[in-house]
Image (cartoon, rainbow, N blue to C red):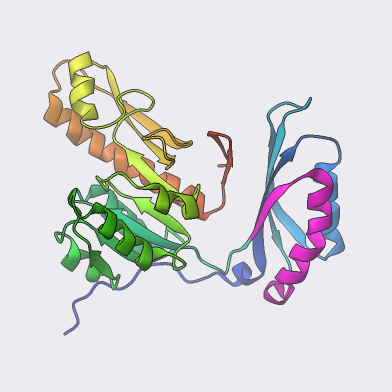
Amino acid sequence: MDTRIKAGGRSAKPYEHNRARMLISCPDGPGIVAAVSHFLHQHGANIVQSDQYTMDPEGGMFFMRIEFDLEQLADRVAGLKADFQTIADKFEMQWNLYPLSQKKKIAILVSKEDHCLVELLWHWQAGDLDADISMVISNHPDMKEYVESFGIPYYHIPVTPDTKAEAERKQLEIINGKVDLIVLARYMQIVSPSLIEPYRNRIINIHHSFLPAFVGGKPYAQAYDRGVKIIGATAHYVTEELDGGPIIEQDVQRVSHRDDVSELKRIGRTIERVVLARAVKWHIEDRILVHQNKTVVFI
């Protein structure tokens, strides 16, 4: 009898085949919303949701997330992108168009601690994470059987100081061109620039601390030594600066002098898994725009 857990991910809703999202960032100025709305109207699209934010109407940046329905979208995406480029050039836009029918593919990297990985798999199995988890890669073999019970490929690539470069080459070989997002679910290795560059703003890390405080290793011990009254976790995009990338989501919980390092870690694990799951969900739902080292998150 096959005892494997049924693979997750929800079935596409009928409207999703004709629905897409656009993310736009550009220098602020008059006429942007009107131009985008008029363009979509001209092409027969129906706007179902629109969010926008300006940093400063005088010389600042403008950000927009717009969701729309368009009949026979799959056959019209290429033409739509080509036609929109004229507007994009006029307003100096950085933009992307994402059909909902094209689910993002995720690679999860993990070490020994499993709480963040398990949370993501739960969300995925329940259909709350509308993406395809294409693979899990780990420098330890511990979770192979559990992950494969979901029908997800598991790659064990050991990492030591002497083999780190070769391990990273193998990781990139497995990942490159096959996924849209990389999630570091308590992956306790520093990611090299060779992986960061091709996945700029597409690698999400969970840091077990409320950044920018207590960066680097053993943040709960650092927090305990400082006698903190709140602890937290931070999900951020990975950059070459350790724990210094654009912050996506954070959360905290109050603690007291009675809580030792072990208790801080226990509380922190709950915060970590919730914060990471939120950040991943927002990314795959195209809710995040990055500007310099900050994010605009439409939720």
Instruction: Tell me: 90 left or right of 5.
Output: right
Q: Which one is in front, 70 or 152?
A: 152
Q: Position of residue 75 (x, y in %)?
A: 71, 77
Q: Is residue 95 magenta?
A: yes
Q: Position of residue 61 (x, y in %)?
A: 71, 33
User: Does residue 36 appear anywhere in the picture?
Assistant: no
Instruction: Tell me: 148 left or right of 169.
Output: left
Which residue lies at the image location 20% right of the left edge and 54% below the top edge?
Answer: 159
Instruction: Look at the magenta stretch and give its main secondary structure.
Output: helix
User: Does residue 73 appear anywhere in the picture?
Assistant: yes
Q: Which one is in front, 298 or 222?
A: 222
Instruction: Tell me: 131 left or right of 78.
Output: left
Q: Position of residue 225 (x, y in %)?
A: 18, 17
Q: Quadrant of the C terminus?
A: top right
Which residue lies at the image location 37% right of the left edge and 52% below the top edge?
Answer: 183
Residue extending farthest to the bottom is: 1
Q: Quadrant of the N terminus?
A: bottom left
What span is in magenta? 71-97
Q: Is residue 5 above or below residue 256?
A: below
